Amino acid sequence: MAAYWLIRTSRRLLNPSITSSSSVVSLSHSAALLSSSTTTAKSPGLDNQFIQVSHWFQCYGFTRGSFKFSQEKCVPFSNYRLSVAWISTSPSGLADNPRKGENQNNGNDGNTVNIPSWIDLYLPSSIQPYAKLARLDKPIGTWLLAWPCMWSITLAASPGNLPDFKMLTLFGCGALLLRGAGCTINDLLDRDIDTKVERTKLRPVASGLLTPFQGICFLGFQLFLGLGILLQLNNYSRILGASSLLLVFSYPLMKRFTFWPQAYLGLTFNWGALLGWSAIKGGLDPAIVFPLYFSGVCWTLVYDTIYAHQDKEDDLKVGVKSTALRFGDSTKEWISAFGIGCISSLALSGFNAAIGWPYYAFLAAASGQLAWQIWTVNLSCRADCNRKFVSNKWFGAIIFSGILFGRIFP
């Protein structure tokens, strides 16, 4: 109730002509006490005027430049952590577009607020670290792993027919499990590096919420469930699927040895382009699936290079490598070339599969989406890099829709 009145009070301070953002103030429980007597969280919508909301809490105060929380005056709430989330109703979004010159750090330092995810709100505390280890609160990775599988399964359908729904479901569940297993492996091998990178230092293993042994046990559980899915495929696909584990386990090490870990991720994440076809056909058609696989690798080089630009400063300090560091100021030229390779390979795969004309209409739309990413991304802005990276779920959906309609209307 108090939070509701705080929100209403703060809204009266906002100038609609300047911003349409609204503030949401919430308290989330934390076992650790506040490190200092006063914590200040900067807010983009308030300026200088001070409002004391003493009717409800003596420890809260608004200024138009900050929101202050005093531990000394609020002893009953000393076990709670203040979270301030900014929800923008404007197209650009204040929370996603820091002003030029402002700190664009996504980590959690002394001046950064932590916005709880659905995992914090709805799952038991004993399960939360495992859910975060599997990145269940960040489904974009599952989408990026699942789309090449869905493309391949749908492309393998007979002309005029819908794809095998059972296979789509199995591969969707498999993508969720394998992505979680891959994240677990990554966090176990990179736990020493993650503590030095602002974006990753609060991951469960790096922060100490889970021990390496607990992480290994959770990894075994995920792989066991994944094995149950793999055993439902034909023998050819079982061998092909099991062989991908070599890529999954070795990928986290690549950033230590090469500037091209994104290419290795492409080989790993797009294995489903091969596996989906074999699950339907019982084998591979190189003229169709190899161009499809190569298109996925090029696509991964585009989106993961954009993603890597978020960590380039930390990567330099830690001493790990990435295509973002390799390409530098020439990044847009490089990823434009990979984008052309992606679209060209998708066109070749569809042509060899004798797919219908709707596919090429959707492929043109997907080309526009990919071009928009490359041309408009601000590689110096972490928020924009992340936004463009996440938008790739729509690229995958457009290609899937094109294959689907191309098969239904040959």
Image: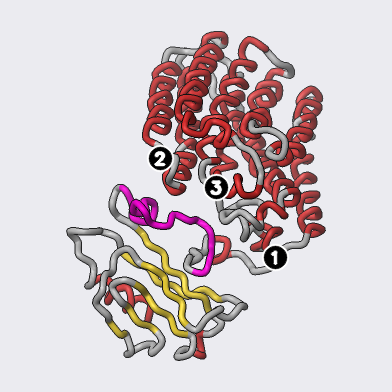
Is residue 269 at all visible to an observer of this figure?
Answer: no
Is there CB contact under 8 Å for labels 1 and 3?
Answer: no
Across and down, in percent, residue 255 comes to 68, 39
Magenta highlight on residue 112: no
Across and down, in percent, residue 53 comes to 32, 85
Q: Label 1, secondary structure: give it.
A: loop
Between 63 and 343, the one nearer to me in the picture: 63
**Residue 280 sits in quarter:** top right
* Left/right of residue 47 with respect to residue 69 in the rendered view: left
Q: Relative to 253, is 72 above or below?
A: below
According to the image, label 1 marks what residue? 209
Residue under the image location 46 percent in, 25 percent down: 333
Residue under the image location 80 percent in, 45 percent down: 224
Q: Earlier in the sequence, mark 1 or mark 2?
A: 1
The amino acid sitting under disc 2 is: Asn
Across and down, in percent, residue 395 comes to 46, 31
Which stretch is magenta?
92-110
The amino acid sitting under disc 3 is: Glu
Q: Label 3, secondary structure: give it.
A: helix
According to the image, label 3 marks what residue? 313
Distance from the alpha carbon under mark 1 to that under mark 2: 34 Å
Q: Earlier in the sequence, mark 2 or mark 3?
A: 3
Rendering colour mode: secondary structure
**Residue 234 sits in quarter:** top right
Residue under the image location 33 percent in, 89 percent down: 54
Which of the numbered marks, if any, corresponds to residue 378?
2
State which quarter of the image contains the N terminus.
bottom left
